[in-house]
């Protein structure tokens, strides 16, 4: 997830929403099987993407050093090693670099509808009525293939573990084992791909705003608020039984929610805590929360990563019609531009849990505190 702020206000976005969405749709490749505009020509160069993450993008003209400061891990996990990524995974990833993809991935023009915590919102550069851009996409096919490759390898290596599990897909490799170490390095490489991917999409999104509004992105103050992963395992240091220990933290269906003071948080946010981005489904609100000390104590600095599905994609296809969804959202002032009607139906708002309830529960549990509620104006779907 990546959130970008602007100095636009809601009315300006509404008045220009159609040219903005057209420009975003034109500039950022999206949809099932979408391929990036920038072709990485050699395997060696693609390995550099997997090693350097978002820094590779910045070094090739996609953004600025300032962008990197507001990314989790500054957009690069150092332990990543491309040699542990299979040729098949690289083959899937190379043509997809710089593309949005399909499913629940999106580009969304939003506005800050409500501020819950003025102090923290000010630290994040957010205020009521302000227009933001949210980017949701990940490691595309390379991440999926890395996972599949290592699951198969673990199944072969540890049949005794599988015998004890309710589902063989829950297979794991013991910490410290050769497979576990290789998998962590390969997964980190896929995460670096994702950060590079979002950095390139940010660059083209800035260009889209420039084209639609006739102003430079700098004049529009299109700055990264934060970028955080929400399906990732990393080695982190946490206090357990009063002692600091290094542990594997696997946030699956979760996102990081570090409280104030952690050195991993950008220096300008460190006194308040890490921004937490919780996206809604198409047509519903999204939230900005802030990490907390309670999260550090109770959940290893983690909270929910989004609404989560209530309905399978197949059930959504049987239950909704694209034209009806587009009209209903249009009547509420939300414009959709999608690569396919199927993408609209699969991601119907009714197929997801109530994002307001998810955010409320996180806040009341103290593991991610409410900062701002963002409402969509226009959505680009893969």
Image (tube, rainbow, N blue to C red):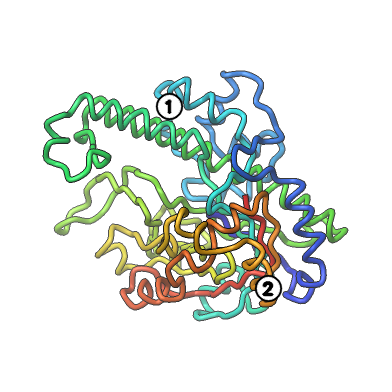
Q: Which mark is residue 130?
A: 2
Above or below — where is 178 with respect to 381? above
Q: Nearer the viewer, residue 319 or 169?
A: 319
Above or below — where is 172 with respect to 102? above
Above or below — where is 119 with respect to 246? below
Q: Is residue 290 left or right of residue 209?
A: left
Q: Who's the residue at 35% across and 44% down the image?
A: 233
Visible residue check, residue 32: yes
Q: Is residue 113 left or right of residue 280?
A: right
Q: Which percent across, then down, holds residue 114?
A: 57, 80
Q: Which percent across, then down, holds residue 111?
A: 65, 72
Q: Who's the residue at 64% across and 68% down the image?
A: 324
Mark 2, residues whose alpha carbon is within 10 Å: few (<14), some, or many (≥20)?
many
Residue carrying label 1: 81
Q: Is residue 39 left or right of residue 251?
A: right
Above or below — where is 163 with respect to 227? above
Q: Secondary structure at mark 2?
A: strand
Q: Who's the residue at 27% across and 44% down the image?
A: 248
Residue 37, image quadrant: top right
Which label's residue is closer to the chain start, 2 or 1? 1
Q: Which mark is residue 145?
A: none
Q: Who's the residue at 51% across and 30% down the image?
A: 50
- Find the residue positioned furthest to the front: 318
Q: Is residue 46 left or right of residue 153?
A: right
Q: Secondary structure at mark 1?
A: loop
- Find the residue positioned furthest to the right: 214
Disc count in the image?
A: 2
Q: Which percent across, then down, holds residue 164?
A: 11, 40
């Amino acid at each position: 997830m990546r959130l970008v702020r602007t100095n636009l206000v809601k009315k300006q976005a509404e008045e220009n929403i159609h040219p903005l969405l057209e420009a975003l749709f034109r500039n950022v490749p999206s949809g099932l099987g979408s391929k990036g505009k920038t072709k990485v020509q050699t395997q060696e160069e693609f390995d550099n993407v997997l090693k350097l993450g978002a820094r590779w993008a910045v070094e090739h003209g996609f953004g600025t050093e300032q962008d990197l400061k507001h990314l989790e891990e500054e957009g690069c996990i150092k332990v990543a090693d491309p040699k542990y990524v299979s040729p098949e995974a690289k083959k899937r990833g190379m043509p997809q670099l710089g593309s949005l993809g399909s499913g629940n991935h999106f580009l969304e023009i939003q506005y800050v509808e409500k501020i819950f915590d003025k102090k923290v919102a000010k630290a994040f550069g957010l205020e009521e009525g302000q227009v933001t851009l949210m980017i949701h996409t990940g490691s595309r096919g390379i991440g999926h293939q890395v996972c599949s490759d290592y699951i198969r390898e673990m199944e072969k290596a540890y049949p005794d573990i599988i015998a004890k599990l309710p589902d063989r897909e829950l297979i794991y490799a013991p910490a410290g084992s050769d497979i576990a170490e290789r998998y962590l390095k390969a997964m980190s490489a896929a995460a670096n791909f994702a950060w590079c991917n979002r950095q390139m999409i940010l660059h083209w999104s800035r260009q889209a705003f420039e084209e639609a509004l006739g102003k430079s992105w700098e004049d529009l103050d299109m700055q990264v608020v934060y970028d955080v992963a929400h399906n990732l395992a990393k080695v982190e240091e946490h206090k357990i039984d009063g002692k600091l220990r290094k542990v594997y933290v696997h946030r699956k269906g979760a996102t990081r929610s570090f409280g104030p003071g952690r050195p991993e948080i950008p220096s300008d946010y460190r006194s308040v805590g890490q921004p937490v981005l919780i996206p809604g489904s198409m047509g519903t609100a999204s939230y900005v929360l802030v990490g907390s000390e309670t999260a550090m104590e109770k959940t290893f600095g983690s909270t929910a990563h989004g609404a989560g599905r209530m309905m399978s994609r197949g059930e959504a296809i049987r239950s909704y019609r694209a034209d009806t969804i587009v009209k209903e959202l249009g009547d509420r002032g939300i414009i959709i531009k999608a690569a396919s009607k199927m993408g609209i139906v699969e991601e119907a708002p009714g197929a997801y849990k109530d994002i307001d309830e998810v955010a409320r529960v996180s806040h009341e549990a103290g593991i991610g505190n409410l900062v701002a509620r963002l409402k969509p104006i226009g959505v680009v779907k893969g």
